[in-house]
Image (tube, rainbow, N blue to C red):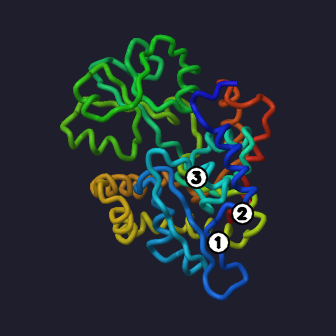
Amino acid sequence: MKRQTLIGIAGAAVLALGLAGCGGGGGNEADGADGPQEATILTNWFAQAEQGGYWAAEAEGIAEKNGVDLTVKQGGPGIQTIPQVAAGEADFGVGNADEVLVAVESGLPIVAVAAGPAKNLQCMAYHESTGIAGFEDLNGHTVARVPSPYWDYIRDSFDLTDVNEINIGDLASFQNDTDLVTQCFITSEPYTIEKMGMTDVGYLRVFEDGGYNAYQNLLFTSQRFIDEHPDVVQAVVESSTAGWQALVDDPAATKDLVMKTNPDGDPGVFDYTVGLFSDDPSYLGEHIGEMTDDRWKELGEQLAQVDLLPKDFDVSKAYTTEFLK
């Protein structure tokens, strides 16, 4: 089975299970005591609007009203939310559904409890002068990407046997090389690309154009935390789903917290992302946080297609909808 797209997951599983067995410290210490119960969410990258529901749950005091003293911590390079949550170093984590499925199959006892954005935000930016119109046209071009399950699926589905794959760089490289195609998020890079003066750029969306719709930036926790603190899980799920709505209703407090946490972030990108979420309800979905059996099943089949999961893998082990109202 291929594992190169998620290097370290299997090893992290062993380490995390060992740490969990030694009682790795979680953030909750107040079960049964007066006052709010503590909980931590570790995000999968620097603070940004694409994680906005979780930051809003803290910034707007939503979690506090639900009886939880919530602390959201930003991730970054070298941060792996899945093994840290499995080890009890954080109570909740933010990650992608395909990563969760592969981690569970590798032995990590983690469980997705709520979706973030309702649709996959991944895309590929290209220069229109190349004549690219679909993923099948990437043959003969250089593609800057992070090795990921979505890329394995796209490469296999569109028979991309003549692509020069390189590690993702900065947008200056994309600007200077019209042959280069680069991975990006439809919610952020278009703003920066336009700000840089590039006007001939098109985007291939991994979901709409590629048919791959893994939940991104979903909320997960460990099975152990669910068993020991179901009331906290319920409160954090309700707080985060309410947080996504609060983000689009009035993002001011959330923006302040995100910019304070990530001072190198671009406020304009934050506003652009929230604007997309606000203008197009499909980004967050009719029922915020909703996860469906059919969508998880389809994702499992797609990962099996590229040998990242066994064909008989039971995807229901990786998520629960019991905390979603």
Q: Are marks 2 and 1 in contact (CB under 8 Å)?
A: yes
Give the residue at mark 1.
28
Q: Are marks 1 and 3 in contact (CB under 8 Å)?
A: no
Give the CA distance from mark 2 to mark 1: 9 Å
Q: Are marks 2 and 3 in contact (CB under 8 Å)?
A: no
User: What amino acid is at disc 3?
Assistant: Leu
x and y percentages locating residue 324 in the rendered image: 68, 63
x and y percentages locating residue 271 in the rendered image: 32, 57
Quadrant occupied by the C terminus = bottom right
Q: Residues within 10 Å of mark 3 (few under 14, many from 20)?
A: many
Give the residue at mark 2.
225
Give the CA distance from mark 1 to mark 3: 21 Å
Give the residue at mark 3.
218
Q: Earlier in the sequence, mark 1 or mark 3?
A: 1
Q: Nearer the viewer, mark 1 or mark 3?
A: 1
Quick check: 260 left or right of 81? left
User: What amino acid is at disc 2?
Assistant: Phe
Compared with residue 36, is residue 56 higher up or lower down, i.e. above or below?
A: above
Residue situated furthest bottom in the rendering: 34
Say which element carries label 1.
Answer: loop
Compared with residue 52, is residue 256 higher up or lower down, i.e. above or below?
A: below
x and y percentages locating residue 14 in the rendered image: 71, 43
Task: Give the residue displayed 41% in from the left and 53% down from the top.
Answer: 46
x and y percentages locating residue 213 in the rendered image: 57, 39
User: What amino acid is at disc 1?
Assistant: Asn
The front one of 210 and 67 is 67
